């Protein structure tokens, strides 16, 4: 009976720890970050969150890029990036319940309210209007709501694009 009670207490304590998505994100932000690999950083965080059984209801893995007429890539310049890295052409974030988790946001934690994220990370009107989601995964169902179907932007169906500003202001 003692062993069963001890096991139950251990499982409850492990479950309590694993329920904190913010703590897991901070661990990945400080200990598992690889510069220039935002898609991999977010994918690794999401993978561990799934492995730990964290609640991913209303959670989305978001990949974005700037669209429009460009010579090669449509670069955008974040205004509050980690390590002051500039000129991105793609980026990946995790969004849950109106909170953005961004491994490349600021130097002090990477978690911010979605509405604040837009104004603090991309404060130029050009970036806000032209940043579009090219891949959107509903993590509670595993469904791709938007899926990149071609590396050639001109071949992607127009209805598979969503502006980041519209998605985050829901």
Image: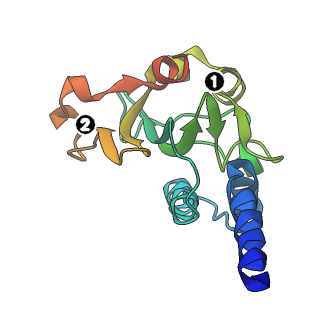
Closer to the camera in the image, 34 or 114? 114
* In the depicted structure, whether residue 32 falls above or below residue 109: below
Relative to 92, 135 lies left or right: left
Query: Secondary structure under badge 1?
Result: helix
Please provide percent x and percent y for residue 39.
49, 55
Residue at the image point whose x is 72% and y is 71% from the top: 8
Please provide percent x and percent y for residue 70.
37, 31
Badges 2 and 1: C-beta atoms under 8 Å apart?
no
Residue 68 visible in the shown view: no
Residue 155 visible in the shown view: yes
- In the rendered image, the residue lying farthest to the right is 108
Which quadrant holds residue 149?
top left
Quarter of the image with the N terminus in it: bottom right
Relative to 96, 116 lies left or right: right
Please provide percent x and percent y for residue 36.
58, 58
- Residue at label 1? 118
Mark 2 against mark 1, which lies toward the viewer? 1
């Amino acid at each position: 009976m003692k062993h069963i009670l001890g096991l139950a207490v251990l499982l409850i304590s492990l479950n309590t720890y694993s329920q904190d998505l913010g703590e897991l994100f901070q661990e990945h932000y400080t200990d598992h970050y690889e510069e220039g690999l935002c898609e991999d950083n977010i994918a690794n965080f999401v993978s561990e969150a799934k492995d730990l059984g964290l609640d991913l209801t209303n959670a989305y893995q978001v990949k974005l890029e700037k669209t429009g007429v460009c010579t090669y890539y449509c670069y955008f310049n974040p205004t509050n990036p980690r390590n002051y890295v500039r000129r991105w052409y793609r980026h990946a974030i995790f969004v849950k319940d109106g909170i953005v988790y961004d491994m490349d946001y600021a130097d002090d934690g990477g978690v911010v309210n979605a509405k604040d994220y837009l104004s603090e990370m991309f404060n130029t009107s050009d970036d806000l209007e032209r940043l579009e989601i090219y891949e959107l995964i509903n993590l509670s169902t595993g469904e791709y709501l938007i899926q990149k179907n071609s590396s050639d932007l001109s071949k992607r169906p127009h209805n598979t694009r969503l502006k980041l500003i519209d998605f985050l202001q829901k």
